[in-house]
Image (cartoon, coloured by chain):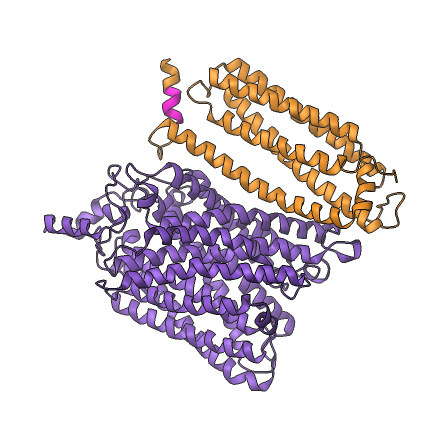
Chain colours: A purple, B orange
Amino acid sequence: MITAAVEEREHYLNASYGIKSWLLTKDHKRIALLYLATITFFFFIGGIFATLIRIELLTPKGDLVSSDTYNKLFTMHGVIMVFFFLIPSVPATLGNFFIPMMIGARDLAFPRINLLSWYLLVIGGLFAIFAMVAGGVDTGWTFYTPYSTSYSNTWVIATALGIIVAGFSSILTGLNFIVTVHTMRAPGMTWFRLPLFVWANYATALIQVLGTPVLAITLVLVFCERMFHIGIFDPALGGDPVLFQHLFWFYSHPAVYIMVLPGMGILSELVSVYSRKRVFGYGFVAFSSVAIAVLGFLVWGHHLFVSGQSLYAGMVFSFLSYFVAIPSAIKVFNWTATLYKGSISYATPMLYAFGFIGLFTIGGLTGLFVAALGIDVHVTDTYFVIAHFHYIMVGGTIMAYLGGLHYWWPKMTGRMYPEGGAKLSALVIFLGFNLTFFPQFILGYLGMPRRYHAYPDEFQVLHVLSTAGASVLAVGYLIPAIYFIWSLRYGAVAGANPWKATGLEWQTPSPPPPHNFEETPVVTHEAYDYSATIGEAVQVG
Amino acid sequence: MASELHVETLALREQFDTASQQKNASTLGMWIFLITEIMFFGGMFLAYTAYRSWYPNVFGAASRTLNATIGAINTAVLLCSSFTMVLAVRAGQLGKRKAIMIFLSLTMLLGLAFLGIKGYEWWEKFQEHHVPGPSFHMEGTPLQGQAQLFFSLYFAMTGLHALHMVIGVGVMSVLLLQAYRGKYSAEYYTPIDVGGLYWHFVDIIWIYLFPLLYLIDRHGPKP
């Protein structure tokens, strides 16, 4: 009976049908699903490249692919994963879907721009895929000059264009979020009643808006240099390749926070709801997001420690880099403090949250190693760095993303995912992840350089462990893909608020109506005030 | 009045509760877009500043080959266009359809005049072999690479600015068409307001480009 009622009610999925109703939709919830499908596609493409890399590295000799092909594999793995999966991942899907709902709005401020930004990501992705199909690109995802402008005989321009276009997608998403949070909040939704997920995405949007244009102009200059040899990065004409590195990392270091900050926002939601406690130190957690966004713009030089930057500049950037640890640590400590004396339940999203806290801590602490000038000279361009940023990007962002996806799946689809399979896959991913990347710390410390497809025999054991872990990880990622699709038809009906959470997104039916709320909500509580939901439960039951 | 109210309701998009909310959102959106534009141009300003400080002599000599008179005339043209843009916004506030159309047209014409003069300047560069490429040559310095670097940046920066002008003229023509159709009134003229912000921004970029490229070290030795 309940099922029948759910199917009859009008919601955003059954409000209209047909391809056109999706491709021309202005509904932020549908656009979020378009993004979800798109980035999942790119995630698996990037995953295929990762798989080939790991298989190649099983043996010390470069026997599966040639060194040129290997260069293309790690480049395309990086390009796809960074620009077409990680950067849009949380903001464009979960952020797009839930920011308007969390602040009690009917939609984002600019729905048409929101749709445009999805098309830009797709067009950018098509450029990148064209480059891959046509023969690949081998510069590394960092496009260092003068290799990318004068020497590489691969599809640099197509890839760069793809990234520029996808960058505008990211800019427009950020712009939309900032304006939405400023102008669309429901009555009573003050800034300090905003869920921390909104704060985190707001801080992320600031970086997207301030950083991405610099990447765009940098790649435009690379494009001009490669097409017309105008000399801006060419030492033969007096140009400076290190200037490229400065411009590139001015965006690409903050981009790390574009990738991880929204994940931290998810964590604040998860830790609170599954320990049934308000987040410890709400204000600190909120402002630590903004602090990370600001400090993130002051540390790019730590990517240039061995690029001929002056020692003085290196010391200043090293010093500043440590400061990022402060707001990051505030978050980790406040999440753990939230757990203290909480009523903790170990639902799947919470398992991912625990995974995030542990792995992000390792990733963050090893970040302090590489921020230290002396140690970095030893480990720079080794697998230590690879392991470090995969602990942040994969162990952090993807863990949080999957946690968020499980947490909000009932709201997005109206169906529960199967808890048993989900817990199993969370465990498999956690184990597979550590088996893949922990050996890489040791490899890097022992001197295994990144971007080599052949290596001395003594590194083989660790590489085999890493590849074995990658296989486990791949299985771990496939399981959710299967049961999420399965749950669309066979999952238990979720109800409006299966987690007894406090956010406004849970105060409306699942899946939500086309305009999110039957009537505009009025907010009278701070976020994470569980006494209110308990009160309602008592009244109802 | 009744018809204006009708326009007003048509213009209010469904995600907004009130017209003032919609106007705030549009205006804030444009300001944030302009911030991204500052960062976009900022990358080039940084590159220019770095190279200018590394190669002050050659950059000074190259800068002195530019025609400052034409640059000054173009600056004046652009400032006038900003003035007519302000008048268009004012006409929007007062809901005077005809005045809106006149001032938008004037803004557009001045923008096109700027582009025409800019095009003439570029054509001159072609004549003088000051366009980066195999036939590049600047008299009076053995450091042809550094001189070419100046002109690379000159063309990149003025070219990108001109592209923004072209987009601006396009925006003006859309606004003009909508004004002709009677879409704007004293209650609803946000697009003119927001389009004006963009126009002024492009103007301001030129206000920085002109002294940076043409005027610094103007009275040093001629090449």
Give whichever of B102, A513 is nearer the camera: B102
Looking at this view, is A273 or A149 the one in front?
A273
Tell me: A428 left or right of A290: left
In the image, is A194 to the left or to the right of B162? left
Residue A91 percent location from the top left of the image: 42, 51
Question: In this image, B178 relative to B145: left or right?
Answer: left
- Tell whether position B47 is magenta: no
- The residue at the point 36 percent across, 40 percent down is A107
Q: Give the residue displayed 51% in from the left and 75% down from the top.
A: A54
Magenta region, residue range: B6-12
- Whether residue A26 is visible to the viewer of this picture, yes or no, is no
Instruction: Please identify the dominant SS of the magenta region.
Output: helix
Query: How far from the left and from the top, in percent, is residue A88?
Result: 46, 53
x and y percentages locating residue A524 in the rendered image: 23, 41
Q: Residue placed at 35% from the left, 59% from the top? A: A267
Vertical arrangement, residue A2 with respect to residue A417, above or below: above
Q: How many marks?
A: 0
Find residue A514 and report its image quarter.
Answer: top left
Measuring from the top left, give residue A484's x and y in whole percent.
32, 61
Examine the structure image and report whether residue B10 is included in the region drawn in magenta: yes
> In this picture, is A255 found above or below A348?
above
**Left or right of B104, for residue B156:** right
Of residues A254 and A508, the one nearer the viewer is A254
Task: Mark yes or no: residue B46 visible.
Answer: yes
Outermost bottom residue: A458
